Amino acid sequence: MTGITRSITGSIQYTSKQSHRLDAERGRESFRLDVHRDGSRVLAAHCEIDDAPAVVRDVNLRLDAGNRPQECFVRIAVGGQFRGSGWFAFNANEAQCESTTTVEGRVSQRFPLQAPLLAFGNHAIINDAYAMSLYDLTQGPGKQTFFMLLSSPDHRGATGPMIFPVQLAIEYVGEEDIEVIAGRFRARHFRILDVGMPEEHPDYDLWVTADEHYILLRAAVTGYMQTAYELSSYTVVEH
């Protein structure tokens, strides 16, 4: 008997909303979410951004049964060349990073935590969507603020990987039915606001599945980025 109870696999299409290249494909992402019998989860993704300098990212995040991040692996290439790889681990009191990068060299970080970490951002779009599970839905629509760590302060996740702390606000707008390339879904609409990064991050709308998996259905980033994301394939396997 396998130790996995459910696997969700899929792909996400990246497009531009800039007027001179409206709806042009600018990247893609494939992902897999495995739910284990002990309630833990592993979320893996391969991401490609075509816009120069191109970014290729592979990530693998493990969460415990309480939905708290336990460890994560991140490898990135920028402009067709290896940029860095890192392993992150989290316990109740500390976050650790061991990485090798072509800019900083060998990096070893220890970041003290006041409480167990609630979320870790590795810049995969599927991971951004899953972070919406932070929001306490019993409070209804509104805005809630959270502390989390990122693998890079760059908007495209093209530096590091290294530990970077941020505060962000998540606004819950409500539920609706939406149609995407992969089909029709009941969705929860969230918005990420006020991200504490070195460069101001534009508002970021996400529609995710209205279940415990928070799979990305659609997303849009405003401001100078003008990018969009859409679920293009979706498969669920019960083990």
Image: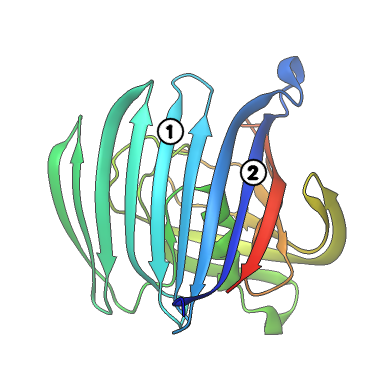
- Identified at 42% across, 75% down, the residue is 68
Q: Nearer the viewer, residue 76 or 190?
A: 76
Tell me whether circle 2 and circle 1 mark residues in contact (CB < 8 Å): no
**128 lies above or below 224:** below
> Where does residue 227 sit, x and y in percent of width and height?
66, 34
In what element is the residue under mark 1? strand
> Where does residue 176 sit, x and y in percent of width and height?
86, 63
Q: Is residue 206 visible?
A: no
Kindly identify the amino acid type of the residue bearing the numbered disc 1: Val
The single residue placed furthest to the front in the displayed view is 1
Quadrant (top left, top right, bottom left, bottom right) of the C terminus = bottom right
> Would you say 73 lies left or right of 26 here?
left
> Would you say 139 lies left or right of 124 here?
right
Instruction: Using a 10 Å C-alpha cutoff, classify the residue at mark 1 as few (fewer than 14 neighbours), some (14 to 19) or many (20 or more).
Output: many
**218 lies above or below 40:** above
- Identified at 38% across, 21% down, the residue is 79
**Which residue is denoted by mark 2 in the rendering?**
12
> Would you say 229 lies left or right of 167 here?
right
Label tally? 2
The single residue placed furthest to the top in the displayed view is 20
> Would you say 133 lies left or right of 151 here?
right
**Which residue is denoted by mark 1 in the rendering?**
56
In what element is the residue under mark 2? strand
Kindly identify the amino acid type of the residue bearing the numbered disc 2: Ile
The image quarter in which residue 215 lies: bottom right
* Cα–Cα gap, marks 2 and 1: 14 Å
Q: Is residue 230 visible?
A: yes
**42 lies above or below 199:** below
Instruction: Using a 10 Å C-alpha cutoff, classify the residue at mark 2 as few (fewer than 14 neighbours), some (14 to 19) or many (20 or more).
Output: many
